[in-house]
Image (cartoon, rainbow, N blue to C red):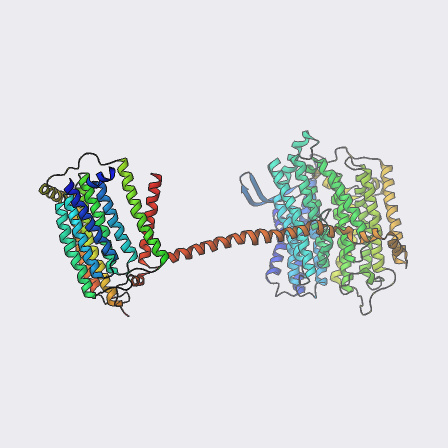
């Protein structure tokens, strides 16, 4: 009963697949949504997916460096959210909307 | 073991559900709330992985600070249900979905292939929780102290930059 | 004074004349320009006289030593080329061969300059004309005095350029411009061969100076006889092809008749007296080398004889006074090559000199006639000009007597020497003599025809044209050249006649040239009765033909027309110059033009241009496609990242 065993024996694979799915969800959101704020939420999703894989590796390979990395990622994610939202505010002030296509105006 | 498995599956389902709703719901407020659910789920998963400190940070920073920031901005913009939540274009849409699917499939394939070739050897073994946090602190303030300090500077710069951006008149053509 | 000074005067006074007239040709009237140019040429002639005087005295000083005196004045001006093994210095040499040439070139050249003052006085571009003429003189002097093949080649190309410029002098007439181009292009073929010959010689002997070449040739004496593929044979053949281009021999003679489009003094100077003899001069200069290659000598003799007889036969039928003289020139040059081919180099030089006198005289005479007739050149519209142009007539008759070989005029001695050497030389052959004698008969006929139609008989001058005698600037050169046409031959009176004369004048020219020219291997034949017999035969035959032509053309006779009628197709063949031009066009020029057009269309337009267009279009299309990728749409950019990730992962998975 390979399938049943893998159902009960939760291992590294389970966490990695889950993190992949989270990442894919986030990617889909980034590619498909129009609202800038939702897109940034999707980016947070992707980051969380990656964080999950780091922590999982950290546990299963008995190395703390993974968690250090997650710590850094979280900080940078917070910073990115702050800047991104500031940009969104700027765009909103100009166009009264937060559609991603207004960012085309930034094209050089 | 069974209880741990049950817990994992429950939290995993919750997280995935939150993630899917974040991407698919058309009202940004609901998206934000679903994202909060996901954050909490991930935090719980961290707990199952014995990363208690990170679980806490996850809750405080993400589910707390970042989510509050999002919701605040949404409230500020007074965004409601969106009519056109997704990008147009059948071909490009199909291409994007295919890309997402392929990425997921290929990464999964890579995971399975790697695990078959070299599965992690031995039992996962980390120290008890309080020792772990202490060890994390030791590592952070000794070996990775430079990165830590750099992050501090980065946060300062970001804080200033965000304020500057938000204070601008808006748009890319400030004069008009 | 030393030789260097005179040589510099000799060379550079025409060049300075060219510069003066060339830079100020808009400001000089015809007379001023003419006087400047003639003075430059005259100064050059004086320098040439001084040099030759030195050369002759040279002999007297060192008479004590050997019997044959090595007369040679060499002047080294500067090092011109120093490339690896090739060292060429701009050095010039005056020895008996070039001494004759510089006298002829500057002497005849000065007279023709003088003549041109009268001939060109009404022409608006006279200053330009005189500038070209002086430039030609400079280049010709470089050609004849140069001590190495490269220096000679400079002059060789220079005279070609001047020839082109002067043939097309009235370039507004498209036909005349085309004649200039024809001369230039035909000469290019010969010049290419000349250069190839130089390459081979440098390869075989390792130097290009005449002295080392002539000495180096003796190295190959042991290998004699040299085969067809021996470098010396090949090199001499290539040089000879170069000579056929410059000296208008078969197969490259076609440009010379057309070159008559230029002003008549130009025809006299360049296309009769000097430039066209450059090929002969070059072969004489390298006589020791050419003697090493008997196969080449055979070719030269055959080509010379054929050219002599073929051009003479075309001359029989032409109606244009200058065309007749042009074919006559080709024919006489054929004799010079025949002489070279049988090893009689001194005879070639002798004929070169006498021909320069009498042919320049006849060309200038024809110029005087054309001038008097208001640019009419058709001898059918002349006749009876004897009374209107007495001086021109008298001098022309002297030239006529010289060229048909009546003793004691100049042409008799030189032509007879050639014919006798052709018969007697070990390299000669009786058949060549027969061909040469036939050519001499034809020469007598067509020259008599020309003189008779132009000067004698009834006047056929159109009404409204009143021929008048030319001004003194034109008649003085005619007189001087007339005298030279008489006495010029006395320099080379053969031993046979000389010994019979009261004051013993042997062949002065031959002994003068003796040291510079390799003697014939078999020695001189001295069958005096045979020599007298042949001499008398040729004189009698020439006189008979001249008398026949006199009867045909001076008296009213229908015989020529009847003969032409009877010969029918053959007459038309000769009249149309054997259709050589047409054959060249059909066999070479038109296919070349068509091939070039095809190449232009298929290779250049269709292949090269199209390739570049396709390339540029591809790049432009690719560029606009890539530009469309950078739309500014952030999600599209994210998609590219995603696609990149997919690609990289696929590659890793497939390969791993």
Kindly identify the residue that appears in the image at 73 percent across and 47 percent down: C249
Q: Quadrant of residue B176?
A: bottom left
Residue at image position (56%, 53%) is C606
Q: Residue C300 vs residue A85: left or right?
A: right
Q: Which residue is at the front of the view, C313 or C47? A: C313
Q: Along the horizontal axis of the image, is B22 left or right of C199?
A: left
| Residue B96 located left or right of residue C374 | left
- What count of labels does the image hold? 0
In the image shown, does B37 or C450 lie closer to the viewer?
B37
Residue C225 in which image quadrant: top right
The single residue placed furthest to the left in the displayed view is B130
Q: Position of residue C219 (x, y in %)?
A: 65, 32
Q: Is residue A36 left or right of residue C535?
A: left
Residue C605 picture location, percent across and down: 56, 54
Whether residue C621 is visible to the viewer of this picture, yes or no, is: yes
The answer to whether residue C283 is above or below residue C566 is above
Is residue C630 visible to us here?
Answer: no
Q: Residue furthest top?
A: C222
| Percent coordinates x, y for residue B107 in the rendering | 29, 45
**Which quadrant would the C terminus of chain C be assigned to in this image?**
top left
Which residue is depicted at the point 30% across and 46% down? B105
């Amino acid at each position: 009963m390979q399938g049943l065993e893998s159902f009960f024996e939760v291992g590294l694979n389970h966490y990695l697949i889950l993190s992949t799915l989270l990442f894919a969800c986030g990617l889909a959101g980034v590619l498909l949504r129009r609202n800038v704020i939702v897109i940034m939420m999707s980016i947070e999703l992707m980051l969380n997916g990656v964080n999950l894989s780091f922590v999982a590796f950290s546990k299963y390979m008995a190395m703390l460096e993974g968690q250090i990395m997650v710590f850094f990622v979280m900080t940078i994610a917070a910073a990115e959210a702050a800047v991104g939202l500031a940009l969104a505010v700027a765009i909103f002030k100009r166009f009264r909307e937060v559609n991603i296509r207004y960012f085309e105006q930034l094209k050089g | 073991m069974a209880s741990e498995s049950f817990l994992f599956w429950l939290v995993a389902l919750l997280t995935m559900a939150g993630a899917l709703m974040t991407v698919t719901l058309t009202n940004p407020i609901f998206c934000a709330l679903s994202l909060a659910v996901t954050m909490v789920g991930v935090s719980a998963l961290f707990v199952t992985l014995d990363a208690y400190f990170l679980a806490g940070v996850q809750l405080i920073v993400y589910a707390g600070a970042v989510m509050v920031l999002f919701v605040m901005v949404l409230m500020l913009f007074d965004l409601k249900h969106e009519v056109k939540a997704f990008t147009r274009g059948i071909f490009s849409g199909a291409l994007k979905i295919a890309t997402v699917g392929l990425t997921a499939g290929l990464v999964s394939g890579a995971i399975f292939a790697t695990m078959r070739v070299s599965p992690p050897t031995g039992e996962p073994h980390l120290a008890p929780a309080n020792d772990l946090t202490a060890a994390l602190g030791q590592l952070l303030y000794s070996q990775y102290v430079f990165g830590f300090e750099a992050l501090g500077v980065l946060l300062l710069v970001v804080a200033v930059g965000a304020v500057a951006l938000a204070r601008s008149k808006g748009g890319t053509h400030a004069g008009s | 004074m030393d030789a260097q000074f005179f040589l510099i005067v000799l060379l550079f006074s025409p060049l300075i004349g060219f510069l003066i007239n060339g830079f100020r040709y808009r400001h000089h009237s015809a007379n001023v320009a003419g006087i400047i140019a003639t003075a430059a040429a005259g100064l050059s002639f004086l320098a040439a006289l001084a040099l030759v005087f030195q050369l002759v005295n040279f002999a007297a000083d060192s008479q004590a030593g050997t019997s044959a005196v090595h007369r040679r004045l060499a002047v080294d001006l500067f090092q011109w080329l120093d490339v690896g093994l090739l060292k060429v210095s701009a050095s010039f040499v005056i020895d008996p061969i070039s001494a004759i040439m510089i006298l002829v070139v500057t002497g005849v050249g000065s007279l023709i300059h003088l003549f041109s003052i009268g001939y060109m006085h009404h022409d608006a571009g006279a200053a330009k004309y005189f500038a070209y003429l002086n430039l030609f003189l400079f280049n010709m002097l470089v050609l004849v005095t140069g001590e190495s093949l490269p220096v000679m080649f400079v002059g060789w190309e220079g005279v070609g350029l001047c020839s082109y410029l002067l043939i097309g002098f009235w370039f507004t007439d498209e036909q005349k411009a085309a004649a200039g181009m024809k001369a230039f292009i035909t000469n290019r073929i010969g010049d290419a061969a000349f250069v190839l010959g130089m390459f081979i010689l440098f390869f075989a002997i390792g130097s290009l100076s005449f002295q080392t070449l002539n000495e180096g040739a003796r190295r190959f004496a042991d290998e004699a006889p040299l085969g067809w593929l021996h470098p010396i044979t090949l090199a001499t053949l290539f040089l000879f092809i170069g000579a056929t281009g410059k000296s208008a021999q078969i197969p490259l003679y076609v440009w010379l008749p057309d070159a008559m489009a230029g002003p008549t003094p130009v025809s006299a100077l360049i296309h009769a007296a000097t430039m066209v003899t450059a090929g002969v001069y070059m072969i004489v200069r390298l006589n020791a080398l050419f003697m090493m290659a008997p196969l080449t000598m055979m070719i030269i003799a055959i080509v010379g004889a054929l050219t002599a007889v073929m051009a003479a036969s075309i001359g029989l039928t032409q109606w244009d006074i200058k065309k007749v003289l042009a074919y006559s020139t080709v024919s006489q040059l054929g004799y010079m090559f025949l002489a070279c081919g049988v090893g009689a180099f001194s005879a070639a030089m002798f004929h070169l000199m006498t021909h320069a006198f009498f042919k320049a005289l006849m060309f200038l005479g024809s110029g005087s006639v054309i001038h008097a007739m208001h640019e009419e050149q058709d001898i059918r519209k002349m006749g009876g000009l004897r009374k209107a142009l007495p001086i021109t007539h008298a001098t022309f008759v002297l030239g006529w007597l010289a060229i048909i070989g009546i003793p004691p005029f100049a042409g008799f001695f030189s032509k007879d020497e050639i014919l006798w050497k052709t018969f007697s030389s070990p390299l000669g052959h009786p058949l060549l003599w027969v061909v040469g004698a036939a050519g001499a008969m034809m020469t007598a006929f067509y020259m008599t025809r020309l003189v008779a139609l132009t000067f004698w008989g009834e006047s056929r001058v159109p009404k409204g044209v009143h021929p008048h005698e030319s001004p003194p600037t034109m008649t003085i050169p005619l007189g001087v050249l007339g005298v030279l046409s008489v006495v010029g031959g006395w320099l080379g009176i053969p031993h046979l006649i000389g010994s019979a004369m009261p004051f013993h004048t042997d062949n002065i020219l031959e002994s003068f040239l003796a040291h510079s020219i390799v003697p014939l291997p078999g020695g001189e034949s001295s069958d005096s009765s045979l020599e007298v017999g042949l001499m008398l035969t040729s004189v009698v035959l020439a006189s008979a033909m001249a008398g026949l032509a006199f009867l045909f053309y001076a008296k009213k006779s229908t015989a020529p027309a009847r003969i032409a009628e009877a010969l029918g197709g053959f007459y038309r063949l000769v009249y149309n110059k054997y259709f050589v031009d047409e054959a060249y066009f059909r066999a070479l020029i038109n296919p070349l033009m068509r091939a070039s057009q095809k190449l232009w269309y298929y290779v250049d337009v269709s292949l090269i241009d199209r390739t570049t267009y396709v390339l540029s279009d591809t790049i432009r299309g690719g560029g606009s496609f890539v530009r469309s990728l950078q739309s500014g749409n952030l999600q599209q950019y994210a998609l590219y990242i995603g696609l990149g990730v997919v690609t990289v992962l696929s590659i890793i998975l497939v390969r791993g």
